[in-house]
Amino acid sequence: MTRPGGTAEVAVPVHDAATVVLLRDSPRGIEAWLLTRVHRIAFASGMTVFPGGRVDAADASLPWVGRSAAEFAGDFGCPPELAAALVGASIRETFEETGVLLTAPPADLSERQPEVEAGTLDFGTLLREHGLAIDADRVRGWARWVTPEGESRRYDTRFFVALLPDGAQAADLTTESSVAAWVPIAQALAEVAAGERPMLPPTTAVLRSLLDFATVADVLAAAPARSLAPVAPRLKVVGDAVQVELPDGTSVRIR
């Protein structure tokens, strides 16, 4: 097989990843915390994304309260150990990229975020030092996308939705983003349509799936009925453009 563009295709491992669509209610409708990745990083460079990243081995053993890993495993069709790691990664990445803790009891340890992001402080150690546990009741599975074959990095990404906890303040803390802010969902999609906000198809699709909800509570209530079957788009070349062909037959140019 060959990659789009004619180069030989090499098997690329698919890594498990988790991302959180952090939401809040506002007079302008539901807003999502959106980050624009710096151009120097290898994946999603310059793109608007949600907080998230690759699963680490330690994510499966974080202190835990709330809905069981077995229940999340049933949602995603994976072993409980992987489900625990996915939920753990989603909450760790939210802290690393926004300073927001989705824990029980609630806490503000944003001043320790740089240490966790830099890897000089283990997230689980931080939680245990302060008597905290990740709160699995604060996240709900929403979608699952797999990076197409032909890309140099591939991820099986589970998308979670979560409400910003009362009193919490998201901040642009991560070194991986050039800008981060609360953006109304309708505004973000309008900017994508106008070519003003680069965004990969999974991010766009998830935002569109949230567009018709009036409140974050409505989103969370709808989560149990969501299909979490993996969406696996394909790459195709049309002229000098590389497009992603989605399961519904529509295509989106990505470069």
Image: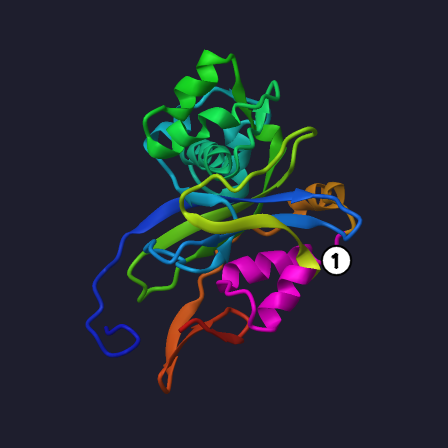
Give the answer, above or below, for where 142 lies relative to 57: below
- Camera-side residue of 114 and 29: 114
| Quarter of the image where the C terminus is located | bottom left
Image coordinates for residue 247, horizontal then vertical, percent = 51, 69
- Mark 1 residue type: Asp
Residue with the mark numbered 1: 212
Question: Residue at the spot x=50%, y=53% of the render?
Answer: 49
Residue at disc 1, secondary structure: loop
Q: Is residue 28 left or right of residue 20?
A: right
Question: Residue at the spot x=45%, y=66% of the render?
Answer: 233
What type of secondary structure mainly makes up the magenta span?
Answer: helix
Image coordinates for residue 163, horizontal then vertical, percent = 66, 38
Q: Is residue 170 left or right of residue 36?
A: right
Picture quadrant of residue 140: top right
Image coordinates for residue 152, horizontal then vertical, percent = 28, 61
Disc 1 packing (10 Å; few <14; some 14–19; many ≥20): some
Magenta part of the protein: which range?
Answer: 187-213
In the rendered image, residue 231 lying in the magenta stretch gets the answer: no
- Camera-side residue of 187 and 235: 187
Can residue 34 be seen in this snapshot? no
Image coordinates for residue 225, horizontal then vertical, percent = 67, 47
Number of numbered tags placed on the structure image = 1
Picture quadrant of residue 84: top left
Question: Residue at the spot x=54%, y=76% of the render?
Answer: 250
Question: Residue at the spot x=68%, y=28% of the render?
Answer: 167
Picture quadrant of residue 165: top right
Q: Is residue 126 left or right of residue 250?
A: left
